[in-house]
């Protein structure tokens, strides 16, 4: 098929090199937990094995995550980084690999990689090197990719994550995955296939964009674990601001390496599932691949060392190319880039411009609050359950919504959390809305909870008002209560009269209660609430009914 360049574009290159001398390494943060293979329990066994009840095979999963760095310009050129820009409109001479052009490293990309490495408890290499990785695709005009094969910017980190193994909120498992390395590399262009004309068009807008490749060791066992690890990494990157990590826009892409083996035996032949851009699809792809490999081995077949893609429409992996003949990337040192030198506070050179120096200690001091720390703070500050803090942090915008709500109302946070997670989040998911798209603002929900707390309305009326807010969101809770006459009945005599009518009209239920079946009283309470449209205080109603029936 023909390869066609859609249009040409050009940008200048006016950046700088980070140079200097190495002066030691930062001490790596202590591992938060140990990672072991072989001692698996039912809760950490892959989903396929749990579903079939067979534990004759162990599954092994490792990930390579490519995170697009949140930067105005590309890694080695000053071309603009812009999603959905017209094809080939953000391409410099260097990005198009025109002869005589040279790479100039983007300081912002290096700082982002250092910050991310700190957050993942990695050891920062004060000296790292760039290499050329050779392969020949139409969307890689130079015929090689600049990456860090021999000596990456950081190594030996760890990522701690949690995931749910049951249907209940508190059935959470905490696990760790080792980070082998974090390396800087440039992205390739994009091939656009036109089947009707039997052409492949090339868009180089993405060529040269800075990536952080985060390589995870094969410490995971199933799709659930891998998806949870990627979601936690996504939260970390967003909190740092080092990557927007929007998977739907290709800013976070995952390659999964999967193999199976008998317990106690060496790892089996692995397959690689490439370019997965959704945590949900990642879990499905891995679990399908484990199932596929298990069925092949059970039937006496062999696993091919191959690259596969995930077809999300059918939920299966499909072969792309085999790896039986090892591909020789012909790695070689990048001759146009010197070693990348970083410094700590004690080794800052006095003969260099401060703008050219990257201080790893200073970057570490500027780290924002990470998701794991945020969860601990929420539990300690507001007295909520750990599983509730997990939901608040993991749902985009929900933590900010909750904390804003807690600040503007005097209602106990333990009461607030139920409304936020059960009612608000349940409504948003049902309507497929984000927190930012919610019709119910924190101020509006705070007003509703205050009306409930001060007993202006009953709990059942509060639910009614909440539903009204979901429908339009323009009126305040107070306006809704006033217009629909939903204020709580405060006249005890009026409530007593209603309760008496219910008691007189339900002799069988009264007799059952008097004979010891106390649960029946809830039916009478419900009848009173129905009569009053939920305006009566349930506690007061129960007290009055007990006085009339059990006295």
Image: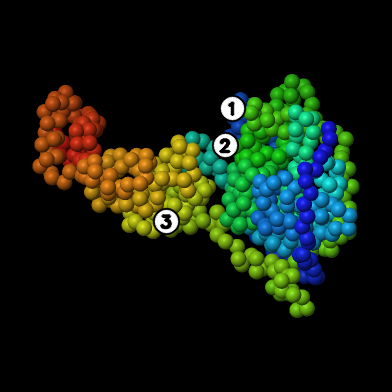
Q: Is residue 524 visible?
A: yes
In the figure, 293 relative to 201: above or below? above
In the figure, 176 relative to 101: above or below? above
* Marked residue nearer the N-terminal end (2 or 1): 2
Label 2: element kind: helix
Query: Which numbered disc covers residue 430?
Result: none
Question: What is the number of callouts on the image?
Answer: 3
Residue occupying image coordinates x 72% and y 45%: 87
Left or right position of 3 against 212 = right
Which residue carries the number 2 mark? 43
Of all residues, the one furthest to the top in this rendering is 299
In the figure, 463 relative to 358: above or below? above
Circles 3 and 2 in contact, beta carbons < 8 Å: no
Circles 3 and 1 in contact, beta carbons < 8 Å: no
Quadrant where the image shows the N terminus:
top right
Of all residues, the one furthest to the front in this rendering is 7
Report the colour scheme.
rainbow
Camera-nearest residue between 154 and 249: 249
Query: Which numbered disc covers residue 51?
Result: 1
Camera-nearest residue between 41 and 252: 252
* Marked residue nearer the N-terminal end (3 or 1): 1
Label 3: element kind: helix
Point out residue 378 in the picture as x, y percentages from the top left corner: 46, 55
Point out residue 288 in the picture as x, y percentages from the top left corner: 66, 30
Camera-nearest residue between 433 and 454: 433
Query: Which numbered disc covers residue 404?
Result: 3
Residue occupying image coordinates x 56% and y 42%: 163
């Amino acid at each position: 098929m023909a390869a066609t360049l859609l249009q040409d574009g050009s940008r200048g290159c006016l950046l700088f090199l980070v140079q200097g001398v190495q002066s030691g390494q930062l001490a790596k943060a202590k591992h938060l937990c140990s990672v072991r293979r072989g001692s698996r329990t039912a809760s950490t066994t892959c989903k396929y094995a749990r579903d079939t009840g067979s534990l004759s095979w162990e599954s092994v999963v490792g990930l390579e995550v490519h995170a697009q760095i949140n930067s105005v310009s590309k890694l080695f050129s000053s071309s603009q980084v812009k999603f959905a820009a017209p094809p080939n409109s953000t391409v410099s001479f260097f990005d198009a690999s025109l002869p005589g052009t040279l790479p100039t490293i983007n300081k912002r990309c290096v700082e982002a990689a250092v910050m991310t490495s700190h957050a993942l408890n990695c050891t920062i290499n004060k000296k790292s090197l760039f290499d050329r990785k050779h392969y020949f695709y139409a969307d890689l005009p130079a015929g090689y990719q600049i990456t860090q094969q021999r000596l990456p910017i950081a190594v030996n980190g760890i990522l701690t994550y949690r995931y749910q193994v049951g249907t209940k909120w508190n059935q959470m498992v905490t696990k760790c995955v080792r980070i082998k390395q974090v390396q800087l590399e440039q992205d390739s262009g994009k091939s656009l296939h036109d089947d009707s004309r039997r052409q492949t068009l090339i868009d180089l807008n993405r060529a040269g964009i800075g990536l952080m490749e985060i390589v995870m060791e094969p410490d995971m066992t199933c799709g659930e674990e891998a998806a949870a690890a990627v979601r936690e990494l996504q939260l970390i990157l967003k909190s740092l601001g080092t990557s927007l990590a929007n998977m739907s826009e290709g800013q976070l892409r995952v390659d999964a390496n999967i193999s199976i083996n008998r317990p106690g035996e060496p790892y089996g032949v692995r397959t690689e599932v490439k370019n997965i851009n959704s945590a949900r699809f990642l879990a499905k792809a891995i679990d399908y691949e484990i199932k596929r490999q298990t069925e092949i081995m059970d039937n006496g077949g062999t696993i091919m060392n191959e690259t596969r893609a995930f077809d999300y429409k059918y939920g299966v992996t499909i072969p792309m190319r085999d790896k039986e003949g090892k591909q020789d990337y012909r790695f070689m040192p990048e001759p146009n880039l010197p070693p990348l030198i970083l410094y700590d506070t004690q080794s800052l050179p006095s003969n260099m411009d401060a703008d050219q120096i990257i201080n790893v200690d200073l970057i570490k001091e500027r780290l924002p609050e990470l998701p794991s720390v945020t969860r601990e703070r929420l539990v300690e500050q507001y007295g909520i359950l750990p599983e509730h803090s997990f939901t608040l942090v993991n749902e985009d915008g929900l933590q900010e919504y909750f904390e804003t709500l807690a600040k503007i109302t005097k209602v106990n946070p333990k009461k607030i959390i139920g409304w936020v997670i059960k009612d608000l989040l349940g409504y948003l998911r049902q309507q497929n809305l984000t927190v930012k798209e919610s019709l119910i603002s924190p101020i509006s929900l705070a007003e509703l909870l205050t009306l409930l707390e001060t007993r202006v309305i009953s709990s059942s009326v509060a639910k009614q008002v909440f539903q009204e807010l979901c429908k339009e969101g323009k009126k305040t809770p107070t306006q809704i209560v006033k217009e629909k006459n939903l204020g709580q009945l405060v006249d005890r005599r009026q409530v007593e009269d209603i309760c008496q009518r219910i008691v007189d009209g339900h002799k069988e239920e009264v007799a059952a209660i008097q004979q010891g079946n106390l649960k029946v009283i809830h039916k009478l309470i419900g009848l009173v609430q129905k009569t009053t449209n939920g305006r009566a205080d349930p506690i007061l109603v129960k007290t009055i009914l007990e006085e009339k029936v059990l006295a």
